[in-house]
Amino acid sequence: MPVTKLEQVLEKLKKAEKKTIAVVAAEEIDILNAVKKAINENIVRAILVGNKEKIQKIAEDINFDLTNIEIIHEKEPKKSAYISVKLIREGKADVLVKGMVSTADYLREILNKQTGILPPKAILSHVTILEFPTYHKLLFVSDIAVILQPDLKQKIAMANYLVDIAHKFEIKEPKVAMLNCSEKIAMDYQNSYDAAIIATMSRRKQLKGAIIDGPMALDLAISKKSCQTKGFISPVGGDADAIVFGNIEACNSFYKAGVYLANAKMAGIIVGAKAPVVLTSRSDSDESKLLSIAVAAFTG
């Protein structure tokens, strides 16, 4: 049966073999709170890389028992990122989690051609999973954080990543909407061309494992009533499992509106590397951080 709630991921992980997360520059209270909850939920093991004294002090403040948790002492966040990525590369950890390190330094170590964990010619992308109280299933969207203005090749990769993650959630044939401001192909708007090309590739089985259609506006992707009102006929219309957005502003705004205005739960991971990567915002809730760690472990 498909996973329909993010909380179900936690329950599945409790019964599965435990993955190990490597936390970069772990001396940060919010991420240590999330790791504490993940350990207490018995869903992962953890290696904490960072300033040991600060980690121990924060752990004491939040009542986090570190007795059986490995800590690798490294005061410099950049070096902490290097060590954590090396743990992934050597198979000693399965998931990378960002702590008190800049996003630029974090990604730089992941992308390093000699010592990083990005396969040749691979494309990094961010997948966000949203659980809306007003939608009938989980919604997988891309990209809120990594690809600014995706070209056709990147949109194909984004669609494939969404499909791969949806399959991990036991959705056999996810329905993917290629989003645009309209269902009509505009002669002077590249995004609508790209959506039509990818939809055609899907119909001709060049892209497998999903039903992909577009271009279509957001209301047509998620509302059957809008499809009926506008006479829009599509195998995806009104029932999308996943949405590929045309640019980062649109996707990021959609996710934030969902979380702050519609009480959506969310989890997000970066995909495309040799292991799932957790990159949460400082403003994300403790629950979102926990769920992101869980999704990374679940899909890795």
Image (spheres, grey):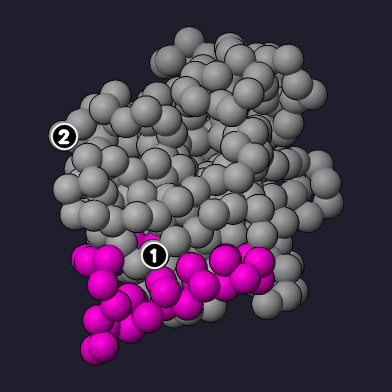
Q: Are marks 1 and 2 in contact (CB under 8 Å)?
A: no
Q: Residue at x 38, y 37 (%)?
A: 130
Mark before the other along the chain sequence, 1 or 2:
1
Q: Mark 2: which amino acid? A: Leu
Residue 230 figure quarter: bottom left
Q: Which residue is mark 1?
A: 214
Q: Secondary structure at mark 2?
A: helix
Depth order, front residue of 91/269: 269
Question: Is residue 71 magenta-colored?
Answer: no
Q: Which residue is mark 2?
A: 261
Q: Residue at x 50, y 35 (%)?
A: 292
- Could you say where residue 117 lies in the image, as x and y percent from the top left? 70, 62
Q: Residue at x 60, y 37 (%)?
A: 171
Q: Is 211 placed above or below 280 here?
A: below
Camera-nearest label, 1 or 2: 1
Q: Residues within 10 Å of mark 2 (few under 14, many from 20)?
A: few
